[in-house]
Amino acid sequence: MGLFDFIRGQFIEVIEWLDDRGILVYRFPAYDNAIKMGAKLIVRESQAAIFVNEGQIADVFGPGTYTLSTQNLPVLTALNSWKHAFNSPFKSDVYFLNMTTFTDQKWGTTNPVIMRDPEFGMIRMRGFGNYSFRVQDPVVFLRDIFGTKKEFTTAGITGFLKAAVVSGISDLVGEARIPVLDLASSYDELGRMAAEKLQPNFAAIGLALTNVTIENLSLPPEVEQMIDRKSSMNIAGNLDQYMKYQTAEALREAANKPGGGAAGAGAELGAGMAMGQMMGQMFQQMNSQQQPGSAPGTAASAGQGAAPGAAGQGSAAQDQGQAAGGKKFCSECGSRLNENAKFCSECGSKI
């Protein structure tokens, strides 16, 4: 191989970029090699090629195959004052930009965002989702963002874009004043509005925000627990029917327990009845307090005109466990007592 053949071999004859690997901008590795006049430039679909001469952006090429000459390098020709018949090799930096849409870019709130809800008042809210973007103006992006690096991946800009998306969505949700309980039905609408709201910010650096998706907007765990309790009370509805249902469920579970038998069923039934009695007494007290003119401690029999003496005698007789016919019964469990008994043989209560 002669000297001239070796020199000609150092001239770049084909300029192309095949592997993107999530790269936004790639500088063609020309180094000190000169580009041969008449070399082939191959720009594939969803790519753009930019020639930079001594730090100044010159010619931009879209998809297609080009034979480099003074005719299709007008800016570069003017910058170097080439003659029309110039055929010598030349030096220029060539950058390829990936114009595809980069999907599934994650966004999420690092800290809870404080908002005002019409029903719950001041709340703390978190959210997450994803967004998609692409290079819209390669010249603006190359000039304002890329700089002079060898290559530029999505990792170099996603932090900036994520912060912009989170800020825009937080501002949008706050301005929308949608109740927390209705947010789930507005995710799609909020996503479209967020994309429109943030588009000018992306366009300023040569990008286009193609889509914003809100996967979830959630509340702190303690607020979610309060919502769950309220939902349970609303589902329960009629408390009397709810207690009957709970008693029936307790009986069914006791019957299905191995070895539970009648004792287990009785215990479950007793617990259910005790709960029902407590709930009933509570609601009776609430109703008596809400009735106008009722005085606390007033017995129902007093309203029926019973004499105070008679009421006192009846109460004393009941306390002694005496009944008509001289028979004695326990005032606690109602069991019949022996004539001289001092304690109930059934429940152990003192007579």
Image: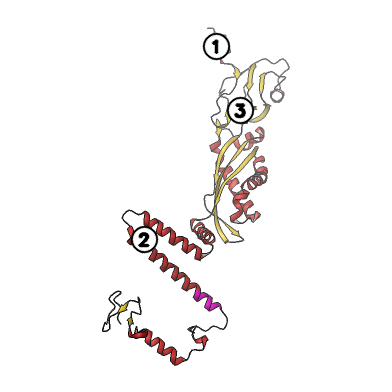
Return the residue at label 2.
265
Q: Is residue 171 left or right of residue 282?
A: right
Total number of numbered discs in the rendering: 3
Quarter holding residue 42: top right
Residue 291 inside the magenta-drawn segment: yes
Visual colour scheme: secondary structure
Q: Is residue 348 left or right of residue 75?
A: left
**Residue at image point 57% right, 20% down:** 33
What type is the residue that disc 3 sits on?
Tyr
**Residue at image point 56% right, 79% down:** 291
Q: Nearer the viewer, residue 92 or 309?
A: 309
Label 2 secondary element: helix
Magenta region: 284-297
Q: Which mark is residue 168?
A: none
Return the residue at label 3.
95
Quarter holding residue 118: bottom right
Q: Position of residue 199 (x, y in %)?
A: 66, 42
Q: Is residue 188 above or below residue 100?
A: below
Label 2 packing within 10 angstroms: few (<14), some (14-19), many (20+): some
Q: Position of residue 321 (x, y in %)?
A: 34, 83
Return the residue at label 1.
6
- Mark 2 vs mark 1, CA separation in Å: 99 Å
